[in-house]
Image (cartoon, rainbow, N blue to C red):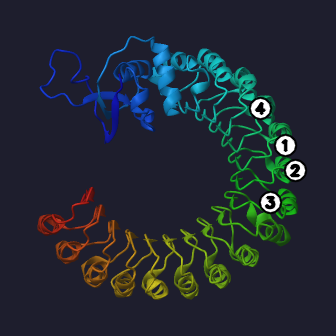
């Protein structure tokens, strides 16, 4: 017989299975509610291939013992087949992606061991693998010849456990994605991972925060030279220094498909930057680069120009918290002039000031593809805002802008408002903690009136007050697409709440409203309640004092 199945996207359904067996069966039992691990519902197997779907689901639930979701299963027939065979067939037909949690780990691994080559994805993040489980996993990996994705992040895997797994990993010829981040691999463990060179299909490797130093990475890089398809490499938060970066440069010469590279917080000095500058010109496929938390301020101007100037096709660049000052910002601007495809730029936590802003503004105006800009806490001030206003108006594709913590003041807010006025693409704007008061609110209102695509607006931790909100409210009424609004810590009272209530009636898609740490009171809350009754999408409302 066959079985029909239908997935229902309703989480948090727990408890006993209803509608099963003769006792307690309803008059018209069309569906049966089952509790299954949420990660097992990625795909549903064809009805004609299921002989005993109900029994398989019960067995999987008992073996894997995970968080549950709800599915509807039409039970049409019974069958007496071995449990292992049923589970294996279930996974093979559905190309199942299995994820385990700590509670069901030992039983789950035994269950997966019976699947042999059916498994294609295994997620074991943060399960606390012990020595016994590591040995069992090693045996499982030897059987899973079709395994493509393996996540072992956050398991405190040390050199001894890596030694247990190394042989099995080398045999996973189809492995395309491996995540070993947040472990304790160390030098010895990195040396054992040289076997990854046998995984010719490896495309993504994540080694973030794994305790690998320069010596360990140099040894590992020797093996990775064989992974010609490697396109995504994350070695962030590892103290590999200039020596390791030098070996990385040699690896990049071989891995010509490299597209995403995360080198944040690895201690790159001027010597390492020079080595990267020499090879980045050959990385034609590189589109995403993260150099955050490195000593960019120590690099020579030639190194900065070589690193960024060589990446002609770069679309994503992160340089967070890199101690970039106004002088370095000028050098950076000259290098970015060659990155004409740049779409995402993140310079958060760098004190570039108004002078650095002036140099960057002259370049960003020519970045026609720029969609995301993060200048949070960069010391722009009123003068810097004025410099950026004209450039931001020329970025017609800009959708995300974060200018929080910059001391813009009322004048700076007015300058920026004039730059964004009439934008058809701006969807996210954050102006948190900028000292914007009632004088800056009218300019923001004019800007909001023309930004019809705006979905997220954050002006929290400012001093707008009731008088400022009176002007701002008129602009908010034009934002029909607004989904998130943050006005917390603004000194808004009952009168401001009343003004806000009159315009929120038109924001039918509003899902999140934050008015916490204001002085709204009972009267203001009552007015808001009446207005928000029409906001059917509202899921989060914060009025806490």
Q: Residues within 10 Å of mark 1 (few under 14, many from 20)?
A: many
Nearest to the observer: residue 32 or residue 195: 32
Q: Are marks 1 and 3 in contact (CB under 8 Å)?
A: no
Q: Which mark is residue 283?
A: 3
SS at badge 2: helix
Q: Are marks 1 and 2 in contact (CB under 8 Å)?
A: yes
Q: Is residue 230 visible?
A: yes
Q: Which residue is mark 1?
A: 225
Q: Earlier in the sequence, mark 1 or mark 3?
A: 1
Q: Position of residue 223 (x, y in %)?
A: 83, 37
Q: CA distance from mark 2 to mark 4?
A: 18 Å
SS at badge 4: helix
Q: Nearer the viewer, mark 3 or mark 4?
A: 3
Q: Residue at x 60, y 20 (%)?
A: 116
> Which image quadrant: the C terminus?
bottom left
- Tell me: 338 left or right of 86: right
- Residue 180 versus residue 284 in the image, above or below: above
SS at badge 3: loop
Q: CA distance from mark 1 to mark 4?
A: 12 Å
- Total labels drawn: 4
Q: Residue at x 71, y 37 (%)?
A: 211
Based on the displayed image, in which of its 4 quarters is residue 179 positioned?
A: top right
Q: Which mark is residue 153?
A: none
Q: Are marks 3 and 2 in contact (CB under 8 Å)?
A: no
Q: Residue at x 36, y 18 (%)?
A: 55
Q: Earlier in the sequence, mark 3 or mark 4?
A: 4
Q: CA distance from mark 1 to mark 2?
A: 9 Å
């Amino acid at each position: 017989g066959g079985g029909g199945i239908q997935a229902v996207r309703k989480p948090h359904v727990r408890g006993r299975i209803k509608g099963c067996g003769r006792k307690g069966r309803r008059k018209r039992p069309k569906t049966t509610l089952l509790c299954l691990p949420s990660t097992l519902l990625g795909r549903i197997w064809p009805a004609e291939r299921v002989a005993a779907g109900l029994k398989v689901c019960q067995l999987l639930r008992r073996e894997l013992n995970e968080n549950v979701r709800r599915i509807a299963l039409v039970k049409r027939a019974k069958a007496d087949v071995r449990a292992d065979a049923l589970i294996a067939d279930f996974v093979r037909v559905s190309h199942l992606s299995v994820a385990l949690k700590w509670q069901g780990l030992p039983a789950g691994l035994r269950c997966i061991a019976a699947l042999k080559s059916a498994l294609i994805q295994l997620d074991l993040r943060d399960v606390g693998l012990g020595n016994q489980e590591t040995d069992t996993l090693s045996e499982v990996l030897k059987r899973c010849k079709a395994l493509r994705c393996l996540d072992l992040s956050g398991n405190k895997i040390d050199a001894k456990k890596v030694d247990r797994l190394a042989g099995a990993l080398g045999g996973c010829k189809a492995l395309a994605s491996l995540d070993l981040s947040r472990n304790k691999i160390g030098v010895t463990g990195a040396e054992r991972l040289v076997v990854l060179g046998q995984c010719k299909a490896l495309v993504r490797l994540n080694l973030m925060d794994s305790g690998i130093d320069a010596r360990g990475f140099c040894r590992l890089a020797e093996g990775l030279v064989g992974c010609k398809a490697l396109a995504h490499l994350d070695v962030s938060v590892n103290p590999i220094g200039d020596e390791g970066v030098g070996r990385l440069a040699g690896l990049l010469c071989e891995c010509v498909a490299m597209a995403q590279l995360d080198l944040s917080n690895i201690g790159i000095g001027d010597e390492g930057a020079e080595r990267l500058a020499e090879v980045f010109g050959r990385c034609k496929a590189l589109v995403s680069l993260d150099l955050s938390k490195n000593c960019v301020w120590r690099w020579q101007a030639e190194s900065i120009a070589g690193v960024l100037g060589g990446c002609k096709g770069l679309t994503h660049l992160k340089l967070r918290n890199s101690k970039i000052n106004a002088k370095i910002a000028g050098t950076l601007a000259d290098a970015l002039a060659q990155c004409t495809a740049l779409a995402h730029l993140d310079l958060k936590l760098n004190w570039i000031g108004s002078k650095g802003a002036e140099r960057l503004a002259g370049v960003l105006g020519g970045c026609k593809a720029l969609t995301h800009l993060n200048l949070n806490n960069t010391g722009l001030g009123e003068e810097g805002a004025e410099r950026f206003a004209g450039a931001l108006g020329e970025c017609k594709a800009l959708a995300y802008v974060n200018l929080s913590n910059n001391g813009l003041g009322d004048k700076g807010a007015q300058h920026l408002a004039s730059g964004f006025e009439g934008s058809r693409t701006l969807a996210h704007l954050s102006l948190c903690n900028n000292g914007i008061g009632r004088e800056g609110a009218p300019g923001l209102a004019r800007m909001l009136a023309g930004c019809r695509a705006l979905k997220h607006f954050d002006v929290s931790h400012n001093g707008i007050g009731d008088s400022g909100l009176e002007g701002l409210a008129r602009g908010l009424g034009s934002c029909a697409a607004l989904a998130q609004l943050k006005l917390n810590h603004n000194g808004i009272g009952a009168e401001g709440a009343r003004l806000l209530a009159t315009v929120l009636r038109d924001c039918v898609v509003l899902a999140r409203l934050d008015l916490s740490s204001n002085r709204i009171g009972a009267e203001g809350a009552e007015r808001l309640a009446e207005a928000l009754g029409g906001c059917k999408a509202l899921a989060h409302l914060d009025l806490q004092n």
